[in-house]
Image (tube, rainbow, N blue to C red):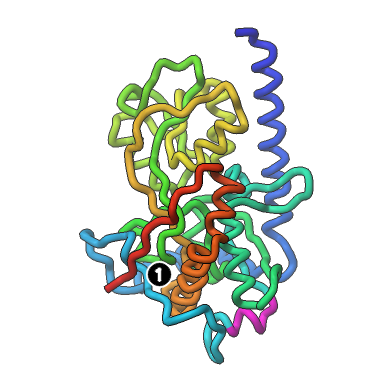
Amino acid sequence: MNARPRLVKRSAVVLAAVLVMAVLAGCAAQPGARPAATATARVAAQAAVAAPAVAATCNPEAASLAPLGPPQVTAGSFMAKIRARGYLIAGVDQSTYHFGYLNPLDGQIEGFDIDMIKAVAAAIFGRPGHVVYKAISDAQRIPDILNGTVDIVAHTMTITCARLQQVDFSSVYFEAHQRVLVLKSSTADGLADLSGQQVCATSGSDSVALITHYHAIPVTVPYWTDCLVLLQQDQVAAISTDDSILDGLAAQDPFTKLVGPALTQEPYGLAISKQHQDFVRFVNAVLAKERTDGAWAASYFRWVSTRVPAPPAVEYAP
């Protein structure tokens, strides 16, 4: 393989990643967004008293509160407070292609996750818009919910029993699976072939545990685009996380490939504070409508694949 085209490609992706990170600060500082809390102790304290611990045998896919009917903004509800404020504050990614990423052509954050947020906001305000997007890393997702910095997080976030001890989630709106991304020149066919080698994941993601389980050496960074740069520079042997994220990275670099079997089930939910159970039920009513009126399928077709499956089966907490 000619090395020069590969170097040009890598340089272009590195430049794109730098551009994304440069805009990150601007998006995070949009007018109207609440300042982030500065005390780490405050986050820890809130997590400790968030709610009774979820049992280790919990079912993450059946842990959310059922809607009480169509989405309605009732007096005194958290949705009414959001409407009075004039905008929904959403914690999102802006570096995961197809799910939440900054379009360099128009400066807009877009993707499958973003469509879910737009639907929630439209249900609150009765029309499109009225969203302030706060670009955050994987590691910021739970702290920002606990601090009240954001109202909701849509960030390829897997519902897990450990996370359910700290925040609530909507019903499952997407199913992913952990896999592996390597250079096309690699002979690895999954995590089992990467024992003793460095594998990249983001800080705060649940992908790190599985990397360690296979005796690979986790290298953690803030954003998945950082992992792609490390892979392109041969500083790591692979990236391992949800196939939804890896598909987006592979689309940005044709010199990479997804390998190996689906290692895990990764049900995605929208994260919400345990203090706002009425909002959880409201969001679930919005998602129920998205699944039945064709909006979920249309978003999937646009951002994920032209082969559209049925939406994930829905279960709620007993």
**Residue 87 placement: quadrant:** bottom right
- Do we see residue 149 in this rendering? no
Q: Which residue is drawn at 62% across and 71% down?
A: 121
Q: Which residue is drawn at 32% across and 38% down?
A: 263
Label tally: 1
Q: Nearer the viewer, residue 84 or 306?
A: 306
Q: Nearer the viewer, residue 306 or 98?
A: 306
Please tell me how crowded label 1 is: few (under 14), some (14-19), or many (20+) other residues with Cα within 10 Å.
few
Q: In this view, does 213 lie to the left or right of 250?
A: left
* Residue 74 on image: x %, y %: 54, 88
What amino acid does circle 1 point to?
Answer: Ala
SS class, disc 1:
helix
Residue at the spot of label 1: 45
Q: Which residue is drawn at 42% across and 31% down?
A: 180
Q: Which of 294 and 195 is in front in this view?
A: 294
Q: Which of 215 and 188 is in front in this view?
A: 188
Q: Outermost residue, bottom direction? A: 75
Mainly helix, strand or loop, the magenta region?
helix
Look at the image and say whether residue 70 sits in the magenta stretch. Answer: no
* Residue 233 on image: x %, y %: 57, 22
- Do we see residue 17 in this rendering? yes
Magenta residues span 80-86
